[in-house]
Image (cartoon, grey):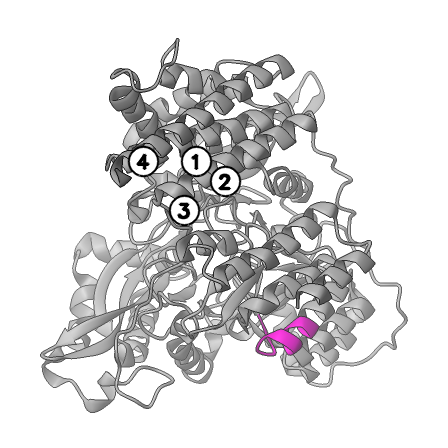
Amino acid sequence: MSEQIKDTLKLSEKISPEAKEEILGLDAKIKEFRSGKMDADKFKAHRLSRGIYGQRQEGVQMVRIKLPFGRVLPHQIHRIADISDEFAAHNLHLTTRQDIQIHFVKLENTPKVWSLLAEVGVTTREACGNTVRNITASSKAGIDPNEPFDVTPYAYNHFKYFLRNPICQEMGRKFKMSFSSSDEDSAYGFIHDLGFIPKIKIENGVETRGFKVLIGGGLGAQGYLAQAVYEFLPEDQIIPFSEVVIRVFDRYGERQRRNKARMKFLVSNFGVEEFMKLVQAEWKAVKYKSVKTDITAISEGKPSEASYELEEPKDKEKFQNFLKTNVFEQKQKGFYGVNIKVFLGDVATDTARTFADIVSKYASEDIRITVNQGFLLRFVKEEALPALFNALDAIGLAEPGFDSTGDITACPGTDTCNLGISSSTGVAVELERIIHEEFPELIFNNDIKIKISGCMNACAQHSVASIGLHGMSIKKGDFVLPAMQLMLGGGIGGDGKGYLGDKVIKLPSKRIPQALRIILNDYEDNALEGEYFNNYYRRQLETDKLYFFKMLKTLGDLSSVAENDYIDWGHEENYIKAIGVGECAGVMIDLVATLIEETEEKYAWAESAFAKESFADAIYNAYNSFITGAKAVLISENINCNTQIGILNDFEEHFVKTGLFQFENGFQETVLALNKNEPTKEFALAFLNEAKTFQNNIIAYRQRKVASKAS
């Protein structure tokens, strides 16, 4: 494979030099790992940051393709489908973070996959791991009738700025950002580490763009709602602000206990006011104090110029329902956005290619993946809608009810993920069947959302669903049943305010369909005229806090367990709880020799950045060299620490104050000079020299220690 990859990279002028270097580097790391020269945990961290995620099935990988704000073009869909046919499972999976995932890829094939993607302008870099993940945005951005302005260029600028940025390559955990197109917050800023909502100020007749900024949100086992720290931050300040927040998170964030390592815990522990003081103290160190966004960087979509015949819809009733639920008029008068409902986010490769050709014929090539695992087509002319519908219907992609109760969001769960506890896709299939057969009117209801995750980590965002479910298990004597935790009341209110769902009851998975029937029937019987589901839910709780628990309690009774309850959805064998080690974030490497090697590597990156006159990047790489080197020495003495700031404190206490290492101004003050100085060439040179001296000293210290043990 290596020679083939090298030949591909040599011939292709479409792949950037940075991507070529990374692809060859991945190939080399795979060989080191296979030969036993690289530690398994270190290799895992390396491949995760390249978008390569270990599956539940031994020996194969999921490859996550990073698509900023969910934008994908028809020729890119063709390429991804071709790759999936050659190297994966003939399927494209759309995610709630607007990525595309392909599954069952052999590790040795991943460099080739990356190179083929890079040829069409797509990357897997930083799609997984402890990095800035995909920047998500409202799929309607640019065509939303309610938007103050198009947030697409701002999302794209964030993607470009943080890709390969040294400040966010090895954080304690992943970091997520979103851009919503309006106050409706359709990109769920309230559950993100950073959420941006566009605002306009008019002063003295001059219009100024800015953003409301939310910080510290997150889902998982313990959800947090993000808090507003700015009602209006000028648009040129959002990248510098994002950078200083990430730098603070990198330095103070937890690094040992993964379940406490997200930024939501850091903000909660410090409090917003104290956290923002740390943010303000970091501003001096950032490369740019103002970053203007080129609003023309992403060309506005335009309708297809391909010719087509005008048609009548072949299924007129279905077409009318499709118009009601899937189609809306854009802010550009005379053009329509068309949402595509994709069952469980899965598109077979043959269907994907045909779909891409249909888009090229009837719509703008600017396709957006939606946060509920669908597609949005843009700039469709009114007269093209019937022909578009007919073409989509022929391949099963014209089902009415987009983003309705009958459009269930579900992660792959136990199908492929190590963390899946019980089947999310199996129960989703059954619930969609029930809705379409027993509650068909709910395909017109876009208030009640159902989201199902295979575990508590909330990849399907079940915590922000009106009816949310996540996989778990329940013990019955010596046996274990597949189960689901039911949550109610999550989502976005009419005012754009976010709500997290409440845990109501744990139920065997096979009883979830009956629970859904009971909930929907009670809503139908007891809701007030025109009352939204979450309002009905909260009103019932005001009368009786256990209203829904009591309603469903008999379903949770395990005294009458049937044989079928021991079998998960989509399976024939009895359930066995099988949870692997999750790879939602990277790993910690505590081998002293490996850490010293990383210290040298990071210093080499600092020198490289300095040579390119990227002084801020050079300084941050040198800072990371300091941190990694100090950690290596601490570990060698069995002194563990779980934050970077803790490493600085502990090294000062145990090695500087004791005279083992000499620093004129102290270790912590020397290292933290990076946020007290502008990133000038002079400071960068001095800082790198200090880092080099420190690197030499820790290598010498390690050699003395090894020699003393040998003697």
Frontmost residue, 82 versus 307: 82
- Figure check: 549 above or below 17: below
Left or right: 141 in relation to 459: right
- Name the residue carrying label 3: 498
- Name the residue carrying label 4: 707
| First reached walking from the N terminus: tag 4 or tag 3 | 3
| First reached walking from the N terminus: tag 2 or tag 1 | 2
87 falls in the magenta region: yes
Magenta-colored span: 81-92
- SS at mark 2 in the image: strand
- Name the residue carrying label 2: 195
The amino acid beneath tag 4 is Ala
Label 3 packing within 10 angstroms: few (<14), some (14-19), many (20+): many
682 falls in the magenta region: no
- SS at mark 3 in the image: strand
Residue depicted at 34% across the width and 41% down the height: 255
Q: CA distance from mark 2 to mark 1?
A: 6 Å
Q: Nearer the viewer, mark 4 or mark 2?
A: 4
| First reached walking from the N terminus: tag 3 or tag 1 | 1
- Name the residue carrying label 1: 215
Q: Which quadrant of the rendered structure holds the N terminus?
A: bottom right
Are the residues at dot 4 and dot 3 in contact (C-beta closer than 8 Å)? Answer: no
